[in-house]
Each structure stands twice: as structure tokens, then as C-alpha cells.
Image (cartoon, rainbow, N blue to C red):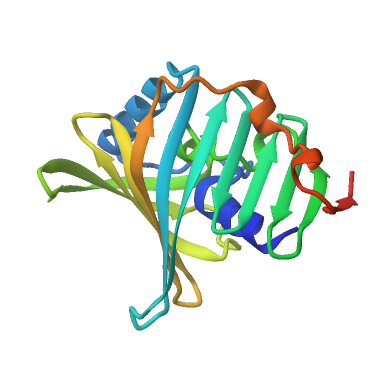
Amino acid sequence: MNKILTLVALLIGFGSVNISQAQSDPAAKQILDGVSAKFKTFKAVQSGFTLKVEDGKGKVQGEKSGVVFMKGGKYRVNISGQEIYSDGTNVWTYDKGANEVTITKMEGGQNSLTPQKLFTNFYDKDFLYKLNGEKKVGNRQMQEIELTPIDKSKAFHKVYLLVDKAQKSIFSAKILEKNGNVYTYTVSNFNGKAVIPDAQFVFDKKKYPGVEEIDLR
């Protein structure tokens, strides 16, 4: 699996584990349920984001910006020379530098890795969660939710979400890895009324002359 897809999966598609949920904070659940319910009302979404990577000492290792498109079970992610497309059945991961695209089948069921999971109910079976309180970012009131993965084999041990209280939308997700690295995914803009044709979710090799295909389906 391409490195960027693995990273995106870590940040915005935490996956699911079939473990019975222990006690979580009802106040945090109410907030997350509100985010999920609002997101499900959108037919298509276009969202800009930034991704910052820091080491264990807080030194910034890199920062990238990108955009994600979502429609039903389809998605597309563009970030710094990498493009990921999914029509809900197949996944195309394109590396601009190598002019190479890897094609895989999208995993089915609860274990599928999709950007939509950041905005919906990914938390319900995967995490214990609690509301840490509120803080301001600029003039926006945020609610901070701390999530701890139930599956201790995960590469990360904590996730901190900031939820815009007025908009009922996720503003940022900070993922703390066990090795000390910190990944912060911040939503820079969000359009819940985007008009996106289905063709945007399929890799069109005609637009990439000489592209090498690696079909792993």
C-alpha cells in the first residue's frame, strides 16, 4: 500500500474493531453524534485541509495542504503530488513524481478506510472518548474531545478532536503516535453543497500520458 494512503487512512479512516465498547462520556457522544448527523445530510462535500507532522520534541517535520472530495461512498484526496481516487469499489493511488498509479479493491464493510469516517460515526466501536472542555480558536468556540483506542495494537495512543460548537463540524484531529510523532489534520474550508460529478472519483489514465499502472485487484 502506498505510503500516503497509509497516512491518510491513519488520519481520516481509523477503521473498526469488533470489541465491546466500555464506558464513554455521554456529553462527548452527544457532540460526536451531532457531527455525524449533520454530515449525513450533505449529498457531496469538498473540504480543504492541512497536515502537519511533528516529532517527539515538537519540531515540525513537514506541513502539506490538500483537498478531499466526498459523495456517498466515493472519495478523492489530492495532497502534494499524490492523488487517491475511489468510486466505492476500486481505489487508485497516483504518485505524480513516479507517474505511477496503483489500483486496489476497496475493502468492504466496517474495516474500509474512507475519509467519510472522520465526519461520521467512526468513534462508536473504536474508542473510549471524553469531553475535555471548551477553548477558543480565533473567534470560534471549540469543544475538545479526547479519544483512546480500544485496540491497543494501534500505532497511535491518543486522538484529540476539536469540534466547532456552532457549526457542529470537526475543525481538527491531532493523532499522537506511540513513537512520539504527532500528526495534526486541520480543516481549512468546508463546502457541504458541492456539486461533484461521479467521474471525479475515477482515475482517468488518458489525462496522465505514460502513466505506469500496477493493478493489484
Q: Quadrant of residue 205?
A: top right
Q: Say which residue appears at 12% left-offset and 49% top-offset.
A: 138
Q: Is residue 16 visible?
A: yes
In which image quadrant can residue 17 be found? top right
In the rendered image, the vertical position of residue 124 relative to residue 104, given as above or below? above
Point out residue 87 in the picture as x, y percentages from the top left corner.
71, 30
Looking at the picture, tell me which residue is in the foreground, 137 or 80.
Answer: 80
Query: Which residue occupies 51% across, 40% down?
Result: 68
Quadrant housing the N terminus? bottom right
Picture coordinates of residue 192 (x, y %)? 40, 24
Q: Position of residue 163 (x, y in %)?
A: 28, 40
Relative side of 115 to 86, left or right: left
Residue at the spot x=39%, y=21% of the render? 37
Q: How many marks?
A: 0
Measuring from the top left, give residue 217's x and y in whole percent. Answer: 89, 43
Q: Nearer the viewer, residue 50 or 22?
A: 50
Q: Nearer the viewer, residue 51 or 210?
A: 210
* Residue 106 seen by the camera: no
Left or right for 152, reference 170: right
Q: Residue furthest bottom?
A: 57
Is residue 38 depicted above or below 6 in this figure? above
- Answer above or below: position of 57 versus 195: below
155 or 116, which lies in front?
116
